[in-house]
Amino acid sequence: MSETWMIAGAWLASGLTIFIFSFLYKDNPFFKIAEHLYLGAGMGWLFQVSLFGVWGPKIWEPLTKGDWVVIIPSLLGLSLLTQFVPKLSWISRYGFTFMMGYGAGLAIPAGLATDFLHQIGGTIKPLSLMASMSPFDIFNSLLVACGLITVLFYFFFSVEHKGHFKKVSNIGIYFLMIYFGAAFGNTVMARFSLLYGRFDDLYTFSAGKYLYATQAILIGMIIYFAVRGFMAKDKEQEAAH
Amino acid sequence: MLKEKLQSFFKIDRRWIFLVLAVVLFVPIMKPIGLPNKTISPTTQRVFEFIEKQPPGAFILFSLDYDPSTRPELHPMATALVKHAFKKNLRVGVVTYIAGSTGLIEEIFEKVPKEFNKTDGVDYVIFPYMPNILAAMTQMASDIYGIYTKDRNNKEIQSMPVMDGIRNYKNMSGVVCITGTAILDYWVAYVGDKYTVPVAGGVTAISQPGYGPYLQTGQLKGLIGGMKGAAEYESLIKQPGKGTSGIDALNLGHLLVLLLILTSNIILLIIKYL
């Protein structure tokens, strides 16, 4: 990539980042530009992925090589578009039926084995191996089993939760709260990481070789907000007079 | 009087908090403080050991499925894992099911192979982006060449030295998936459990707690979580990178949050009992 393009890319990246962050101070036209550009670019990106990543290699190329079988899935896919024409929308059922059957056939056995049977096995198995386990592992296994049973009980609504049942379901709530707390803590950490990533790029683009893109755009934004603030104040004073 | 003053703390313009947070995260980038990252979580250690125990020449399939939106967390861990694989002289195959990750994969493989003197087609292969992830995963169980015939540069893969003896999952030593999506779940359910292929992962910090059950049962061999996990892996392979440099900012950011939570709770208690 040529140096000019690198500099242009740096100005674009730091500009759009600062424009998006500027919303934290106040809504402004630069934020709107970045927001609309993001949506447009996203749609454009998806379109070219569909065209060059799916349509080209999966339909066009096989057809040009005489592989006519791809017409069948292509027609099933195209049938979904008939949803937009009410009179022909019944045709879309064929596409949806295929998708439902294919999806269910793949997902149900895998889901049952992975998320149901393996998890039950994973909870029960350690309990049968206690004799060879360390005290910490025994405690851990019992804690997992206790968490599983109490949380499942919390979501079991066919018995009224009162008396001893309420105590069990309350323990389940504590397990859930610990999970939510851990998940929220991790979410905060993840958001900081993403923010750090943007700041790291902004710092990179503040270098002389990028013609001080970050500083220039930041100063430009500050001047814009200052001018806008003064103008708004003037208007208020005029209105007061 | 004091009560009113303290109550005004809760009316503070939140934009001041944004500014303080921005400063706290930006300063360590300009002047690294070098706060240590001394803890290595057992799940990251397990991923390290999984790669470490592979014999030279073993084939590891990397599924790098993340785009720029999760780059700060996942790119450092993907880079560290590829470095580790090359350091151990493993053969590396890279697949992706997120179109946005192709550029990021190129970014890794522009630099890392040169560091370890590795050659495209001999030591590693990058397969092109493939839509319909489940079809690709299922097909690879019987014959990888049924779904991938060429690499991302349109070169035939079957004759490449890196693919020597590789036809399906049975010939691979494992799969490592780095993603901010549910693709790791697919690898566990449709490949790991079904074909008894060892699967390890790297995910964003947000998704990390959800993978606890898979780790407990051994369905996942190990898990790297977020930028913290990336920093841990970098310190395990003794090659500090972007994950390690981010730890300063993360630590300071967390301290700020703790400080704000503590201060507001103390003020609330004072207001309540004053």
Image (cartoon, grey):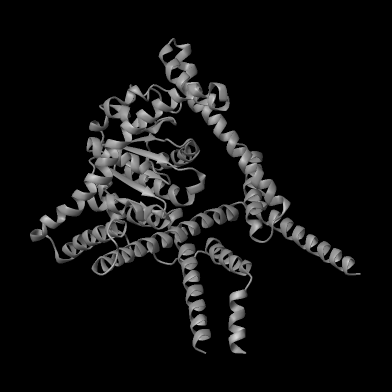
Foreground residue among B256 and B191? B191
Residue A137: image quadrant is: bottom left
Q: Position of residue A183 (x, y in %)?
A: 40, 59
Q: Position of residue A179 (x, y in %)?
A: 35, 61
Q: Residue at x 47, y 76 (%)?
A: B262
Q: Position of residue A10 (x, y in %)?
A: 63, 46
Q: Residue at x 43, y 48 (%)?
A: B74
Q: Quadrant of the N terminus of chain A?
A: top right
Foreground residue among B171 and A51? A51
Q: Is residue A68 left or right of residue B60?
A: right
Residue B165: image quadrant is: top left
Q: Is residue B143 left or right of residue A25?
A: left
- Considering only vertical position in the picture, is B210 above or below B56? below
Q: Residue at x 91, y 69 (%)?
A: A241
Q: Position of residue B250 (x, y in %)?
A: 47, 63
Q: Can the viewer see residue B233 in this picture?
A: no
Q: Can the viewer see residue B29 in this picture?
A: yes
